[in-house]
Image (cartoon, rainbow, N blue to C red):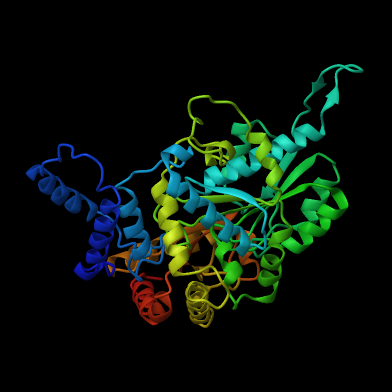
Amino acid sequence: MMPPFDAETLKLLEQAVKKLSGQFAELPECAATQADPRVGEVLQQVAERMGDNYPYFHPLYAGQMLKPPHPVAHMAYALAMYINPNNHALDGGRASSAMEKEAVREIAAMFGWKEALGHLCGGGTVANLEALWVAGRISAKSASHPVAPGGATRVGQPKKIVASTQAHYTHERITGVLGIPFAAIECDARGRMDMGDLEAKLKGGDVGCVVATLGTTATGAVDPLSAILEMKAKYGFRVHVDSAYGGYFKLAGNLAPEARAAFARMNEADSIVVDPHKHGLQPYGCGCVVFKDPQVGRLYKHDSPYTYFTSSGDLHLGEITLECSRPGAGAVALWATQKLLPLEPGGEFAQGLEACREAALELHRRLAADARFVTPFAPELDIVVWAPRARSASEASARSRAIFEAAARRGLHLALASLPAKFFAGSGMQMDSEHVGCLRSVLMKPEHKQWVERIYGLLDEATRSIPD
């Protein structure tokens, strides 16, 4: 079963293509591209090759962070490709650049910012790179000092950037690329940044930016942003929120109090990253970075007499991005989706997020009541982790993989995750390893709410098939 993309839906795209084509009807005729019969043959080969995939679009795929784009995003992207705009400069993507600015303003408004500066990029990695690049530039500038009285100014070294051990691994990699010192902060038994360890490192006075993750990749844990902001007032540093996965849950009305408190204070951060190609119903790659202070745009300043020649005096998105050529079609798809499903609490889009969380809570409830499993903590968003109950961590890890493979044979696709042994303290397992191999399920499709019983039934079958 493929997603609902039937002939009637495709007719809507055909009608839109005719409307778009009609706007260029006054152009002189040029040689039309002749239909090539080989195209159909190649597309059949593509369809054959693409069948060698897991069914990411189906509710029985509950493994990694893969959510099907909304049909309007599919069609808006395809429609824009008839123009193939480049949102690097206005003359390469006039309409799509305007649509990107509008869509990003709506995302910034979701976080409580009216005058923010931001743009789309290839994904969370590049978005976080830009945020940390800005943080490094600012901390280096604050450490600047004159070489001699009245002389030139020497730019200082950027201060350290810190993130939790459960934050995405790209933060450490990014700081390596940027040449900025990095330090990892320990996490607590629920996968959130440990405030005691953070303060110990802040006392050194060399931290320029703290990365707070609202929705870790492994477990969906939400760092205590309120406590981090209180430490910011005491020690002075930038706060960057990496909510590549969890950012849209700002709209959800059914978060637990601790998570809700963190999301409520996102507007006090200095920069935020969110990935529309995760919970924003967009095709890959579509990430977004926004800065609270629009003045950070000055850090991107450069001269390029050819790229930025334009017929208007408006701001080029290429003047506030590190990336150059960027697909305007991605901006068009995002704009169309947000017009259909506005980013507002209680709206249809928000209800979809709430359904995902309800599915995760229900699956966790069933797992917690089953003596065969150990659930370290309840989900904060829509990611559930658990391990088979076993005598030791190594035995639990082996059983996790066996259940993972048995479930896949039954059409249920889960994921594996290696989590710190301290998450399972009190489980009775002998900790003969620093990590426990667990099962992980990302219930990020609203349909998962209706499929929990089926998912649990297949998990039960898979578990029973593994000998003790």
Disc count in the image? 0
* Lateral position of residue 14 relative to residue 167, left or right: left
Q: From what the image shows, is residue 351 above or below residue 268?
A: below
Decide if residue 68 is in sight here. Answer: no
Camera-nearest residue between 141 and 330: 330
- Residue drawn at x 46%, y 69% is 341
Q: In the drawing, does residue 192 fall left or right of residue 374? A: right
Residue at position x 10%, y 44% in the image? 35
Which quadrant of the structure image shows residue 459?
bottom left
State the quadrant of the N terminus. bottom left
| Residue situated in front as seen by the camera: 398 or 25 | 25
The x, y position of residue 260, in whole percent, is: 67, 71
Task: Say above or below: 173 vs 388.
Answer: above
Residue 328 image point, x, y percent: 42, 46
Residue at coordinates 53% horizontally, 78% vertically from top-left? Answer: 361
- Residue 441 visible in the picture: yes
Residue at 70% from the left image edge and 66% from the top image edge: 262
Q: In the image, is 363 to the left or to the right of 466? A: right
Between 453 and 408, the one nearer to me in the picture: 453
Give the left or right position of residue 347, taking residue 23 as reference: right
In the rendered image, residue 448, in percent from the top left (x then y), is placed at 41, 75
Q: List the single residue furthest toward the right.
A: 149
**Residue 195, position in %: x, y?**
77, 58
390 vs 56, nearest the viewer: 56
Q: Residue furthest left?
A: 37
Give the position of the C terminus as an image quadrant: bottom left
